[in-house]
Image (spheres, rainbow, N blue to C red):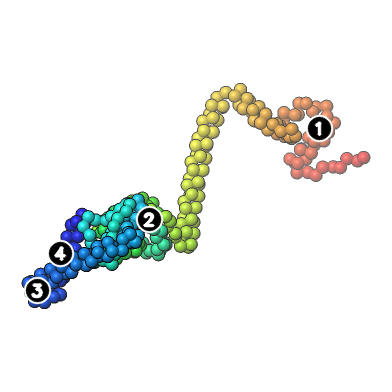
Amino acid sequence: MSTAIINGHNNSTEDFTKHVFGGGPDNAEKVVEENKTCGKILTVLAWGLVVLTMPFSLFVCFKVVQEYERAVIFRLGRLLSGGAKGPGIFFILPCIDAYARVDLRTRTYDIPPQEVLTKDSVTVSVDAVVYYRVSNATVSIANVENAHHSTRLLAQTTLRNIMGQRPLHEILSERESISQHMKALLDEATDSWGINVERVEIKDVRLPVQLQRAMAAEAEAAREARAKVIAAEGEQKASRALREASEVIGDSPAALQLRYLQTMSKICHGKFSTIVFPIPLNFVTPFMKDFKGLDLLKSNVVSDKNKEPLVPIAQ
């Protein structure tokens, strides 16, 4: 791939030379030949300088790049064939060679919060994280001025565009699909820059305070409505169960008495309790025949029926 790029670079340079220098194709070819000849002469002089200044020139000519780095070498402004050099030791000629180090490790870019207007006209603040690395060192140097800065600006723009095309409920519930879509778009756009986007993650979606309160009130009202419906259904089921239980107890008087005693045992569960038994007066009358105040009680009842005042008893 690097050889094709280098050949394409040379062809574009030759076309540019033909357009810049007049005199037709013959003159352009002469200029190119002169440039090649001049380059050969400068290369020979550089090798001579290296030999004359031996061994001090070795400290300048030999360079080292790390395992995670590559060196892209330019000789007289042209890319050297063979692609990027490294890792390890590589050789450059003084005065005519220049090189650029390219780091191949994965980089992390924290996209700052972006104010986005969603499809349903809601303003949200979205931030994300992009993980990318340089996959082709030569292309990242030759095809774009600053591959890292360009990738970061493209990530911000892509995030805003994607969020602006979706409604709020999709942004809140489909973060994974949005991340995958954004990764595909970034990877396709940065392929010509020698950048490989490995992963994109949506960090946070911040809503306005008023919208948060409105959504909280809506959720609370929905929960209260569901609670009321559930309570009503429970009361309905309980009433049906009580009706069936009353029918069963009504068929057996002993069952009613047992249920009554069970209820009394539950009431007397504590240490201190007061139990009041409502007993009709007709049940007590046979046991109160010898009570002296019974005649007075009967006279009071008769006087109430005749609507006549009672005569006070003399002491």
For marks 2 and 3, give the one nearer the viewer.
Answer: 3
Circle nearer the N terminus (2, 4): 4
- Crowd class of label 3 (few under 14; some 14 to 19; many from 20; radius 10 Å): some
The residue tagged 1 is 294
Mark on residue 27?
Answer: 3
How far is mark 3 from mark 4, CA to CA? Answer: 17 Å
How far is mark 2 from mark 4, CA to CA? Answer: 34 Å
How far is mark 2 from mark 1, CA to CA? Answer: 104 Å
Mark on residue 107?
Answer: 2
Residue visible at 23% across and 61% down in the picture: 79
Query: Up-down: is 236 above or below 55?
Result: above
Please provide percent x and percent y for residue 146. Answer: 31, 64
Residue 259 placement, left or right of 144: right
Q: Is residue 271 visible to us here?
A: yes
For marks 1 and 4, give the one nearer the viewer.
Answer: 4
The residue tagged 4 is 11
Task: For the N terminus, give its image quadrant.
Answer: bottom left
The answer to whether marks 1 and 4 mark residues whose Cβ atoms lie closer than 8 Å is no
Q: Is residue 166 visible to us here?
A: no
Relative depth, front residue between 231 and 104: 104
Residue 188 placement, left or right of 274: left
Circle nearer the N terminus (2, 3): 3
